[in-house]
Image (cartoon, grey):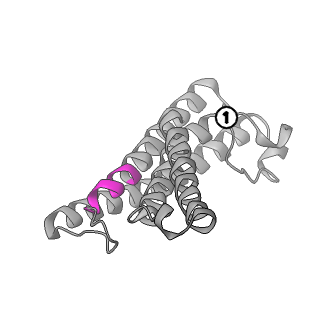
Amino acid sequence: GGVAAALILGICLLISAQILLNLGARILGPGWGGTIPSYADFAGFMLAGASFLALAYTLRMGGHIRVSLLTQKLTGRAALAAEVLCLLIALGVTGTAGWFLVSLVQESVHYGDTSSGIVPIPLWIPQTGVAIGMGLLILALLDTLVETIRAGGPVLPDSAEE
């Protein structure tokens, strides 16, 4: 969560710096302005990293939208079964996505893929942040599944209560 927040702050600082450079050019003349090379690429890479690195933290804080129309009516073993089933499905989906994200990073390293902006960034660098974020979400889901089974019911905070 902290790394994701730092990346969002980095986006704000980068875009603010570019805005100040644009303002300088408009107010003081072209000699006072400038462009940060590939700033949009860097902002996009930081946004992807922030989005994926925040997934596990958001899950554990109850920030993900959960459709609980059916499950809120369930009690006891039925509630436990529904929660475990949902977590297993989520693990299957995120595990598959994680597998393909790691494959994407390996492919980018193998082929030496770089971004097409002014500053060529090896694509494995931002892709690694995304893959790590997905891996952390998989671990958070596994942890939540184990906690749910041990507790005998849902353990995640309900975002509908807010």
Is residue 125 one of those drawn in magenta? yes
Q: Can you tell which quarter of the image residue 9 is in?
A: top right
SS type, badge 1? loop
Three-letter amino acid code at the position of disc 1 = Leu
Check the image and name the residue furthest to the bottom: 116
**Residue located at (27% from left, 58% from top):** 124
Count of labels in the image: 1
Q: Residues within 10 Å of mark 1 (few under 14, many from 20)?
A: some
Which residue is drawn at the image coordinates 71% and 51% (left, top)? Answer: 65
Position of 162 with respect to 126 (left or right) is: right
Q: Position of residue 2 (x, y in %)?
A: 52, 33
Q: Closest to the observer: 79 or 59?
A: 59
Residue 30 x/y as whole percent: 50, 70
Question: Residue tagged by mark 1?
Answer: 156
Q: Predominant secondary structure in magenta?
A: helix
Is 129 left or right of 124, judged from the image as shown? right
Q: Is residue 26 left or right of residue 105?
A: right
Q: Quadrant of the C terminus?
A: top right
In the image, is residue 2 above or below residue 138?
above
Q: Is residue 160 magenta?
A: no
Where is residue 104? Give x, y as percent: 29, 64
Task: Write down the region rendered in magenta.
Answer: 122-130
Residue at position x 57%, y 60% in the image: 24
- Vertical comparison of 114 with 68: above or below: below
Left or right placement of residue 20 versus residue 112 in this view? right
Q: Could you say which quadrant of the image residue 156 lies in?
A: top right
The x, y position of residue 70, in whole percent, is 80, 53
Image quadrant holding the N terminus, namely top right
